[in-house]
Amino acid sequence: MTKKLRVLIVEDSEDDAELVLRELRSGGYEPLSERVDTHKAMADALKRQMWDVITIDYSMPHFNGLQALKLLRKSALDIPCIIVSGKIGEETAVALMKAGANDYVMKGNLKRLASAIEREVGDTEVRRERKRAEEMLRIKERAITSSINAIALADLKGNLTYVNPAFLEMWGYSRSEEVLGEPSVNFWQMQEKAEAIIETLRSSGKWRGELIARRKDGSCFDVQLLGNMIIDEKGNPIYMSGAFIDITERKRAEDLLLEAKEFSGNLITSARDGISVLDNRGVHIDVNPALCEMTGFLREELIGVGPPHPYWPPEQYEEIDRNFQKTVAADFTDVELTFMRKNGERFPVIVSPSAVKDKQGNVISYFATVKDVTERKQAEEAIKESEEKFRNVFDNSTIGKSITSIDGTVNVNQAFADMLGYTKEELSHIKWQDVSLPEEIDEINRKLEPLQAGREKFARFVKRYVEKDGSIVWADVSTVLQRDSDGKPLYYITAIQDITERKLSEEKLVKSYESVQKTLNDAINTMVKIVEMRDPYTSGHQQKVADLATAIAREMKLEDTQIDQLRTAAVIHDIGKIYVPSDLLNKPGRLSDIEFSLIKAHAQSGYDVVKGMDFPCSVAKAVLQHHERLDGSGYPNQLKGEDTLLEAKILAVADVVEAISSYRPYRPALGIDKALEEISKNRGKLYDPDVVDACLKLFNSGKFEFKSV
C-alpha cells in the first residue's frame, strides 16, 4: 500500500528532481511534490503548503543548502530536511547537520532516500499530530506578525529566534535586515539589567516591568516588557517570549506632570509676593514664606484659621470681607486693602484672588496673591511732595522746558519762551505744531509713537523751531511721557537745548570736508593723467581695473569704507610708472631682465608716492602689493598669500584680467576668455580663490563687462 507524501524538492535540475521522485515511488510512497531553486520560491512554497519532508540539493547556481536551511529555521517550521547532493566533504556535511539537516544522501546512492525519509517522517498518526501542531504554530505566528505590539522570541541562551514587524519598526530596523541570532541584551541600554531579567525569566517564568531600549541608531526609548517562559507539554522550558509597548510618550507626560507639580510648588515657595491657598469656606490650606514674613505670623498660626484671618484688622473685618466677596463676584479683580502685622502695624496691600472650580462650576478653593504696596504708597506721597520742587526747577531752569498735553498745548518755562521770542502767556495759547516746521511734524509724531505705545520711555531727537520773527532755531529735544497709575498718558515733559551755533559749525565743517575731498579727487585724477600721458597704450587701464576691482569687492560683500579705499588704490595703482622711462613703457619688443626690473620698481615707487599723501594706509599697501602672488613669486617683496592685503589680492586679479584682455605694444589684445582662463588655471596658486570665484561669477552671469574709457 502506497503512502502519500508531500515533498518539497529544492533542486535546480528537473532530471535530478525526477530521479528523487522515482526513488520515492519505488520505496512505496505516492509523492505530491513541488520543485524550487531560489530563496523566494522556497519561501513562497513554505507559506503555501504544509510539507512532510524537504530534500535539498547542496549546490545550485543561485541558492545553496545552507541558505535553504537558514530560511527553514527562520520560518519556525519543524520539517525534516534531507540533503541530496553529489560528493561533499566531511566538514561540509557536519556544517549542514549543525544548520538543521536531518540526514544527507549522495545522488549516486539514492536507494537510501526512501529509508531515510521513513526514519524521519515516522508513523502517520504522529506525523499528522505534528502537522496539526505546526498549523497551530503558523496561525499563532500570523497573529504575532500582525500584532501592533512588538513581539520577540528568544532561545534559552537569550538569542533572538523570531521578531515580528512591529519589533523591527520599534527598534528602527527594516524588514530586510537580519536580527535573528543576535543576543537580545544588545537591544537594551543597560545590558546587565537585561541579563538579570533573562535570569529571572529562567527561574520564575515571567517578568513584568519597564526598562530602556536602544534603537539601531543608538537613540534610547522607554518600553514596558511582559516576559514569559514558554514550556512544552512536559513542563520543560523551550524558549522565552516578550511583548513590548513603547511608553516613551507616557513617560514624557509623567515627567512633565512631575515637573509641573515641582514648578508650581517652587513658584509658591519662592514667590516674593505673599500667596495663600484657602478652601471654599475661606480657611487657610497653605501659605508661602513671603506671606508669613510680610505679616509676621508663623505658618502654623495661619493654617486652618479664618475667616476672619489674623492679619485682618479687627475694626475692618466687615469691610474686608465685603470687599473680598465683591472682588470674587466681579470675576476676581484686584482689591486694595489694609492688613495688620502681628505687632499691630497696619500696611496697605493689593490682593488678587482667583477661584478653582470643578466641572460643574462650583468653587472648591481660592488662590490669592498679596502684594505689600507700602513703598508704592510712600512713593506716591513723595511724588506729591516733589511737585513743588519740580515746578521751581522747571520755572528757573536755564534750559528750555515744556509740559505738553496729549492734544498738543504747551506750558513752557521762561528759558523756552526767550529762545523763541514769545512770552509764556503767548505760548500757552498755541500748540507745539504751530512753532514747528510743517515738513517735520509727521516725522516728530513717528518718533513719539514708541512712547505712546509703551515700547520706549524716553525719546531724543533734533528738530527745528520757528521763532516769532520767522527765524529758525535748531534744538536738541529730550522728552518723556508721564502716565497716571493706570498707565494712561498724561503729558510730555520736554527739555529743549538751542544748538543752532553747533549746527552752523557742522555745516561749515561739511563744506570744508567736501572741499578737501574735491581737492584730493583732483589730485588723484591728475596723477592718473600723468601716468596715461607717459603710457598712452594703457590709457584707461587704471579706471577699468578700478571698475572691476570695485565690482569684485561688492560681490564679496566687503564694507563700503573698504570698497571706497580699494577703488582709490585701483585708480592710482600704476602711479609709480612716472619713474619708469617712457621708452620702456612703450617698447613693442621683449624686455631684457634689466629693463623688466625697472618696470617692476613701479610698485615700490607708487607706494613711496602715495604713503606721503592723506590716504588710509590700506591704499598705499594695496598699491605696493598689487603684483604679489599667493605662492611668493610676485614682486617687489615676494609676499605669500597670508601676508598680502585682501585689497591687493582683489587688485591683482582685476589688473591681470584687464591687461590680458586689452591691447599692449608688444602683443595684440588676447580677449576676456583668455584672461579668465589665466585666473582659473592659477586659482589658489597665484590668485586668491575667493577673489577668482567672485570675478568669474561677475563675467559668467553677465553682471559685469569692461566699458570703453
Image (cartoon, helix red, strand yellow):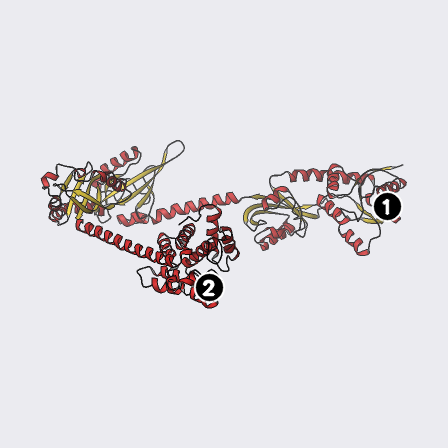
Residue in the foreground of this view, choosing between 38 and 114: 38
Q: Position of residue 291 (x, y in %)?
A: 29, 47
Left or right of 504 in this view: 227: right
Q: Is residue 177 left or right of residue 35?
A: left
SS label for mark 2: loop
Residue under the image location 26 percent in, 40 percent down:
446
Q: Disc 2 marks which amino acid? A: Gly
Question: Which badge, 2 or 1, comes first in the chain's sequence?
Answer: 1
Q: Residue at x 78, y 47 (%)?
A: 61
Disc 2 target residue: 634
> Where 77 falls versus 645 (above or below)?
above
Q: Indicate which label's residue lies in the foreground, 2 or 1.
A: 2
> Is 241 positioned to the left or the right of 563 in the image?
right
Residue 247 falls in image quadrant: top right
- Residue 157 in the image: state x and y as whole percent: 67, 52
Residue at 42% over, 62% down: 583
Pick whichever, 111 or 374, lies toward us.
111
- Residue at the top extreme, as displayed: 360
Question: In terms of depth relative to the viewer, which is nearer, 364 or 585?
Answer: 585
Residue 148 found in image quarter: top right
* Quarter occupied by residue 539: bottom left
Answer few, some or many: residues within 10 Å of disc 2's Cα (few below 14, many 20 plus, some between 14 and 19).
some
Determine whether the residue tagged by mark 1 lies in a helix, strand or loop: helix
Q: Position of residue 655 (x, y in %)?
A: 44, 56
Q: CA distance from mark 2 to mark 1?
A: 89 Å
Residue 638 appears in the figure = no
Residue where numbered disc 1 is placed = 113
What x and y, as percent, mark residue 215? 58, 49
Give the side of residue 353 with respect to residue 408, left or right: right
